[in-house]
Image (tube, rainbow, N blue to C red):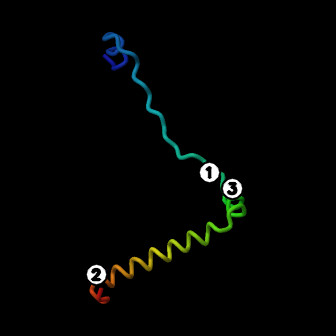
Amino acid sequence: MGEAKRRKKLGLPPRAKPVELRLPELDKQNIQRKVRSFLYKNPIVPFVFYGLVIGAFGWGIYNLMKGYQLIKS
């Protein structure tokens, strides 16, 4: 006896078929257009971002030097 007949005999609904998951299609041109328009409206964002990255890098070097006790504080 197959599974479908057994489920019908037990009064169960048919087994749900698995849904295939796919990655969404990305529209590269649309994303590029949105990013550029955002940066044209907010030209300070790259400077802030790079400033934060350089600050985080400097803070990490400071803590590394402090951890190895190259800086006496």
Residue bearing mark 2? 67
The residue at 65%/68% (across/down) is 44
The answer to which of 13 and 42 lies nearer the viewer is 42
58 in relation to 8, above or below: below
Whichever of callouts 3 and 1 sits on the residue coming sooner in the sequence is 1
The answer to which of 6 and 58 lies nearer the viewer is 58
The number of numbered badges drawn on the structure is 3
The answer to which of 24 and 52 lies nearer the viewer is 52
Name the quarter where the C terminus is drawn. bottom left
The answer to the question of whether label 2 and label 1 lie on touching residues, with beta carbons closer than 8 A, is no
CA separation in Å, label 2 and label 1: 45 Å
Residue 36 found in image quarter: bottom right
Residue 50 found in image quarter: bottom right
Give the numbered dot on residue 34: 3
Whichever of callouts 2 and 3 sits on the residue coming sooner in the sequence is 3
Name the quarter where the N terminus is drawn. top left
Label 2: how many residues lie within 10 Å, few (<14), some (14-19) or many (20+)?
few
**Amino acid on which disc 2 is placed:** Gly
The residue at 52%/43% (across/down) is 22
- 46 with respect to 58 (left or right): right
Whichever of callouts 2 and 1 sits on the residue coming sooner in the sequence is 1
Residue bearing mark 1? 26
The answer to the question of whether label 3 and label 1 lie on touching residues, with beta carbons closer than 8 A, is no
Location of residue 4 in the rendering, given as x and y in whole percent from the top left corner: 37, 18
**Amino acid on which disc 3 is placed:** Lys
32 in relation to 60, above or below: above
